[in-house]
Image (spheres, rainbow, N blue to C red):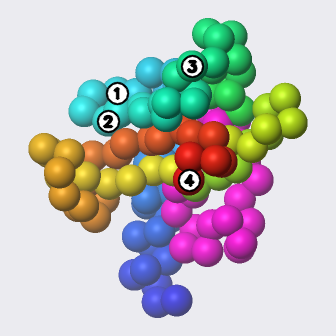
Amino acid sequence: MSETIIANSHSIAVRNDYLRSFLPMMPNPHKLILSAHVSQLTRGEMFEIISLVKRFTNFTNENDPYKERDFGRVVFCDEVFLWKFDYFDESFTSFQENGIRALTIMHESEY
């Protein structure tokens, strides 16, 4: 990897970690999106899953090959939940590198 790519990946990773530190809230204009499955859980269960995402540190070459810390897998009550950052333009309609973040948390069956 070139030094520019490494520096950019590090910058993205720092920003992603910073935004996760605010969970369950996300500073504007960023958004937290809970999938249909997650939204149907009890408030306590949702909070536990969000807390696991917030504290996630198990980044490996397998789940984070670009070192951007934008994806993770957590287990709650023997069920797997995935989380993923996506990057959008201001209208949330198109990809924009290093744009506004949407953090989605979903059950693995919804991926």
Between the residue at mark 3 and the residue at mark 4, the CA separation in whole angstroms equals: 16 Å
**Most extreme residue toward the top, as rendered?**
43
Main secondary structure found in the magenta portion: loop
Between the residue at mark 1 and the residue at mark 3, the CA separation in whole angstroms equals: 24 Å
What amino acid is labelled 1 in the image? Pro
The residue identified by callout 1 is 27
Name which residue lies at 14% across and 45% down. Answer: 90
Name which residue lies at 84% across and 29% down. Answer: 77
The residue identified by callout 4 is 111
Asked if marks 4 and 2 touch (Cβ < 8 Å), the reply is: no
Mark 4 or mark 3, which is nearer the start of the sequence? 3
What amino acid is labelled 2 in the image? His
Mark 2 or mark 4, which is nearer the start of the sequence? 2
What amino acid is labelled 4 in the image? Tyr
Relative to 25, say whether 8 is above or below.
below
Q: Quadrant of residue 27?
A: top left
Q: Residues within 10 Å of mark 1 (few under 14, many from 20)?
A: few
The picture places residue 82, in percent across and down from the top left corner, at 63, 47
- Residue 88 visible in the displayed image: yes
Mark 3 or mark 2, which is nearer the start of the sequence? 2
Range shown magenta:
53-70
Name which residue lies at 71% across and 32% down. Answer: 52
The picture places residue 104, in percent across and down from the top left corner, at 47, 41
Q: Which mark is residue 30?
A: 2
Q: Secondary structure at mark 4?
A: loop
